[in-house]
Amino acid sequence: MKRTPPQIPQRLPPKQVEEIRKKLDQKKSKRKSFPPMSYAQASSQAANILKLKDVFPALPNKKIVEMHNAALNVTQPKGKNKRSFTTKGPSRKQVIVSLLDQHVKSIINNVGMHINSINGLLKNVKSSLRAEFIRPMTESIVITTNNVPASSDLSIMEKYVKSIEGIGSNEVATPRLPQSKLYLKITDIPYIQPSGITISSDNIINYLKDSDLFEDTTLAAKPCVIKASPKSDMAIIWIDIWDSQNSSKAKKLINHSFNFGRYIATFRGTSMNPGVPQCHNCWKWGHSTFSCKAHCSKCQKCRGPHKIENHRDFVWSAKLTSNLTPLN
């Protein structure tokens, strides 16, 4: 018998090699990666699979394994969630204008006229922004719009509010968009100053004003000063500042140091603590005003089906009707 010489394998063209590599990569990506387990866990799972096989002997082995994995909810392991120090914040399709309470009431009394006037001014400059409604808040009004306002739209609203009769130009703050809260703490600060006086929140505010890191940054609340521990001579200062939703201030401040007298203090990020929301429609905790499902507004004092402005009238009328004696 004649022996055939061994055939020399021919080289594949580079395009075909790339296609084969892509197919192999796709097969590798489709493979499920299961979390690691101990020997005891693996043996218990094998026993469970055998029990399922005894209960359903007609099913193929592949179906038995799929049933077992579905019962255990086996999925690919997820990566660790990134820690966030900034709240998401409300929608930016609204404008907050700080005013006195008396001016807020006068605007709400003629709210329809003010919305038409603002929209007329926006139409004159050919802006696509429109004011939808105005709602009152503590010492401010919130103008809800159909889009996120630009800086030119904010200036138009500011000029209009300042032109309202009875409102002085100095009594109107610059309109701003809603922002998110950034939660920080300052470490490595002595609780007792060299003068012998304990550090206060006013001292913290003055030091932050002088720091270049805190430039163009606004506090959302008064700083809170506590001891690092009952027997420690160092303090931890908790501060809340206004930040954008992309955490631009957080990137600037976290893990950066500044001079606090002869000491070097450091900004650290802390866990978000936005608190529990309270609805201003039904005055219950746990949901916001926009997501309230109550059919009507309730009184803040008696929880009755009326506004707080009409509380006295409704309460007196209820008392009078309850005291009336029925006619026989």
Image (cartoon, helix red, strand yellow):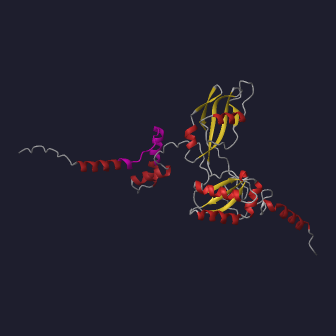
| Side (left or right) of 201 relative to 68 | right
Q: Which of these two is toward me, 164 or 57?
A: 164
| Side (left or right) of 250 relative to 307 | left
Q: Residue 11, relative to residue 121: is it above or below?
A: above
Q: Residue furthest left?
A: 1
> In the picture, residue 226 is in which quadrant?
top right
> In the picture, residue 161 is in which quadrant?
bottom right
Percent of width and height locating residue 80: 51, 42
Q: Which of these two is toward me, 294 or 182?
A: 182
Q: Which residue lies furthest to the bottom in this view?
A: 328
Question: Is residue 42 a member of the stretch shown in magenta?
Answer: yes
| Side (left or right) of 277 relative to 63 | right
Q: Residue 81, relative to residue 279: is it above or below?
A: above
Q: Which residue is drawn at 84% across and 64% down?
A: 313
Question: Is residue 303 a member of the stretch shown in magenta?
Answer: no
Position of the N terminus by quadrant: top left
Q: Which residue is drawn at 72% across and 35% down?
A: 202
Percent of width and height locating residue 310: 81, 62
Q: Give the range drawn in magenta.
A: 28-48
